[in-house]
Amino acid sequence: MHFYRVLRPFHAITLDLDNTLYNNYSIMNQAEEQSVLFLQQYHPALSKIKKTDYCRARKILKIIEPDIYHDVNYWRWKSLKITLLQAGLNKNEAQAGADYAMEIIIRWRNKINIPLSTHNTLSALNTKWPLIAITNGNANPITCGLQPYFQYILRAGINGRAKPYADMYYLASKHFGLPCKNILHVGDDLQTDIKGAMLSGMQACWVNQYNTDQFYSIDIKLLPHLKISKLISLTYLL
């Protein structure tokens, strides 16, 4: 545990999900691989489709529609649909294919093995502080067993713009009935979690466990209050 700023008293905690409470990289890789395998069998024109084809469409779509990333499910679905249209499928085929592929992605991305240490940490934190999850992603906390720890699950697209925009931080503050300065946000991403927390007035804890090559990119004005290498280190604050 390393402190960069003085940590003031806080009375509630918000937490990111992906790569903060569990390793999300292998999960998403598997989900995307399964969706590609499905698409290769879905239509003869897609027999050689690759993940890179979808990724290219996703990047181009964000340039055309800069705000689409706030809803990660819609962004992914529309990128898939565009990819299928570009491969020569008609509108109905492309829409159905994108629908089916999204079902596969959602199913596989929620096959999350939550570490026992995460359950133990959240259970311990809950004895002292109320918790709210704030995520830019599409993981389902009910499916993976995380729902009971949180008062609310705030999701970009549904509950506001994606982090680092302040929408969900302010909404969490409203739910807690506390000013942002009395809330600690915990997350893995310096450019979304930590930047968003600092700009919204919350205190920030960077979990540098699964997403380790970021520190060079942070503005010194947005340094978190503390850094930990394992989520369970939060229990030392009890």
Image (spheres, grey):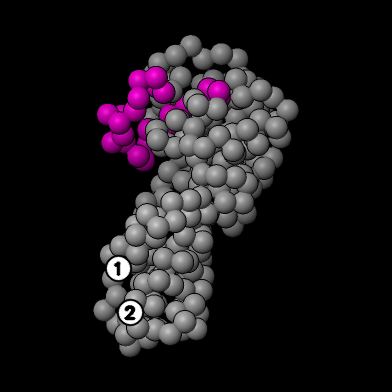
Answer with left or right where residue 18 lies relative to residue 143: left
**Residue type at tag 1:** Asp
User: Which image quarter is the C terminus in?
Assistant: top right
Q: Is residue 213 magenta?
A: yes
**Residue most extreme to the top:** 6
Q: Which of the pair 48/113 is nearer the observer?
A: 48
**Neighbourhood count class around disc 1 (C-alpha, 10 Å): few under 14, some 14–19, many 20 upward:** some
Q: Which mark is residue 210?
A: none
Q: Which of the pair 87/123 is nearer the observer?
A: 87
User: Which image quarter is the N terminus in?
Assistant: top left
Q: Residue at x 70, y 32 (%)?
A: 174
Q: Position of residue 197 (x, y in %)?
A: 51, 29
Q: Is residue 133 magenta?
A: no
Tell me which segment is drawn in magenta: 201-223
- Answer whether labels 2 and 1 touch (C-beta < 8 Å): yes
Q: Residue at x 51, y 70 (%)?
A: 103
Q: Is residue 111 visible?
A: no
Which residue does the numbered mark 1 point to in the structure image? 53
Instruction: Give the total of numbered labels.
Output: 2
Q: Residue at x 61, y 51 (%)?
A: 158
**Residue most extreme to the bottom:** 44
Q: Is residue 2 visible?
A: yes
Lower sequence index among marks 2 and 1: 1
- Name the secondary structure under disc 2: loop
Whether 40 is drawn above or below 204: the answer is below
Give the quarter of the image for residue 29.
bottom left
**Neighbourhood count class around disc 2 (C-alpha, 10 Å): few under 14, some 14–19, many 20 upward:** some
Give the quarter of the image for residue 90.
bottom left
Which residue does the numbered mark 2 point to in the structure image? 87
- Quote the CA–CA distance across marks 2 and 1: 10 Å
